[in-house]
Amino acid sequence: MSTVGASQKIVDYTVVRAHLTAGLFFFVVVLFTGLLYGLQLQQLYPFPGIEILSPGRLRMVHTNAAAYGFLVNLFAACLYWIIPRLTGSPTLSVTFGRVIFWAWQLIVLSAAVGILLGEAQAVEWGETPTWIDPVALFGAALLIINLTVPIARRRDRNMYVTLWYYSAGFVWLALVYAMGNFLPQYVLPGVGGAAVVGLYIHDLVGLFVTPMGWGLMYYMVPVILKKPIWSHTLSLVGFWGLAFFYPLQGIHHFLFSPIPMYAQYGAIISTIAIEIVVFTVIVNFFMTLRGSADMLRTNMSLRWFYAGMVMYFTTCFQCAFHTTLTFQKVIHFTDWVVAHAHLVMFGVFGFWLLGAVDYLWPRLAGNAWYSWRLRAWHFWGTVLGLVLMFGSLTIAGLVQGNLWAALAPWEQSLIGSTPFWTARTVSGVMIIGSQFLLFYNMWMTTRRPTLVEEPHAVLVDDAAPAPV
Amino acid sequence: MHERFTTVALVAGVGCFALAWCLEAWLPLTHIGRIPVKTLEELAPEPTETFLELAELYPKSFKRAYGEPTADAFHDSLRHARDTYIAEGCWHCHSQFVRPVSNEDIRFGAVSTAAEYQNEMQLPQLLGTRRVGPDLSRSWNKHSTDWHVAHFFEPSWVVPTTVMPNYRWFFDENDEPNRTGIAMVTYVMWLGSWTEDWGDEIDEAGENDS
Ligand code: HEM
């Protein structure tokens, strides 16, 4: 980790700030489309009968904005912050980075507009209209090149753990995106296409979002705790375990389908196997925390990170069970899976990125946070909202699955879900409200140069205030 | 060695991905790929009764959209319906995939087979991963044409507790199904028409109200 003066010269603060802001903009889009779609499921949709605001289309905007707008932008902000610091050299080009930034926003916005205009593609999580796919792949490739150059320049030396995850994640992103968006669309019909779509859904999370997330954790946690990761061996086990087992799991999205059974069993076994790997990573991070746990009270970023890790453990523990055929009979097709998706996408990676925002914003703004209490309220509001959402949807899933298997009339499963869907809307409002505390706090931080009520004045600790 | 860029990018990045692709995609594809892929013309050569019925029920709108109810017009309508089904995200609320468990064969009809999906209407595949509404791959005999027309216009008129959105833009200025509306009704009443009739059993479960 480079010294302060040097890192200021090689990190382009403008592009970090731009990606961070864009990520939060799309976060708002994600939240409101989610809330609206949730209202449809309560028969309370405010814009019925309007073609471009059809709930089915909004749902696709919800998930795509989450992946390509919210997660990709915030991860990009972190990448631009971290990679030069770890490699000691800047990205390929500053101008290039800014051009890619605008190109990417244009791609995500036109994808959203395309979906609203009825041009979606039937690839789950790749609903971006078919004509955008090649452009998006090209845009991602540019981003990858810009960020890989500083890593590859140091080819002769061993890399830090974060960079293992980043390097492999970049390769995977390109491969996964190309595979998922083109093969099932043009070449492979039917269940063969389903096998590939399963790989795509799963790999986008497992081989892009997850490596970006763990890369972030392996950088941030030692920097904040000011001590190294507990065990290098466990870091190695975690990385290579992920690389080996994760790509094998895609078909667990289509169990009991006409895909040959051995492929389904293979997916199930590797899904269970990866829980062991996940466990090693979690142990590694909690052993690193040992002796410093008090910082969870005083450092908000750390609190987000470790809250996310608890959720990560929960999600993965859940996977090991619900990937089995026994669970699948009941929970497949139900809200159980939706609960799981929000726990992992928001509860884990969203939390880590909010922790990163908490860390980056005062450094980008050159100011201490405006209010500690708002940060704390933001944290607890979001956590409670998410836990409520996860809990209610998980139960809803069990209710739905059992009513279906019992051959109750379909409407019964809708009526039975109503209380849980109401709870989801309440949790959505809680989550949205909490984010506005964050936005207000960020706004005031840029405007008010004074430290207002920070009880533990350890704000800008390891890096000097940025040039604004 | 194993902590260098080239190793990580090639072995973990390319290698592990390729291994997984071989085991979990290419290998199953060698079986599935043996089933020939049908075009829509091979799959459904003749117009269905629904399509002919719609031509009689809504002559003006039908004529404007499709002219005569020929086989070509029928194929055109099914393709358009498939595209609409994708664009509207119907597949995020409905599956087209009956599993051999949880009594799904009793509720919906015959369990899905690989051969059913080897055709251009399943490129891209529409198995689906979420059910807010019921599976549609056997929906051909569940309801009448009129039911579907009313249902797309305002689902809660036929199923008060539904959460399905309405699709007013499937209808023209006289509230008759337009090109898309005719296509969608034809499509949902075509899905599964190649399987045996499970209507009787479904009646007993109180599911069939048409
Ligand atoms: C206000 C907060 C949110 C609400 C109310 C909400 C609501 C919803 C709803 C209603 C669905 C459709 C579920 C269904 O088909 O039954 C959905 C799906 C989804 N949402 Fe959200 N959402 C919220 C936040 C988020 C965030 C922050 C993310 C990601 C970072 C996210 C990622 C997803 C994903 C990946 C799915 C697809 C789930 C699946 O197909 O299994 N959501 N959300």
Image (spheres, coloured by chain):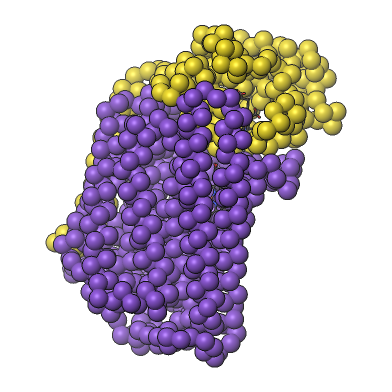
Chain colours: A purple, B yellow
Find residue A415 and report its image quarter: top right
- Residue at horizontal 41 percent and vertical 58 percent from the top: A348
Residue A359 vs residue A57, the one in the foreground: A359
Q: Residue furthest right?
A: B174
Q: Residue A147 in the image: state x and y as whole percent.
A: 37, 66
Residue A199 is situated, as x and y percent measured from the top left of the image, at 37, 40
Q: Which residue is painted at 83% across and 20% down in the image? A: B60
Residue B98 drawn above or below residue A234: above
Given residues B80 and A313, the one toward you in this image is A313
Tell me if I can see residue A338 in this picture.
no
Q: Quadrant of residue A303?
A: bottom left
For the N terminus of chain A, the image quarter is: bottom left
The residue depicted at 41 percent of the width and 73 percent of the height is: A301
Residue drawn 19% across the image and 56% down it: A237
Q: Residue furthest left?
A: B1
Picture coordinates of residue A321, whole percent (x, y): 33, 41
Residue A49, x across and y down, in percent: 75, 40
Residue B64: which quarter of the image?
Answer: top right
Residue situated furthest bottom in the rendering: A450
Image side of residue A151 versus residue B128, left or right: left
Whether A358 is drawn above or below A387: the answer is below
Is residue B146 something one can see in this rendering? Answer: yes
* Nearer to me, A439 or B64: A439
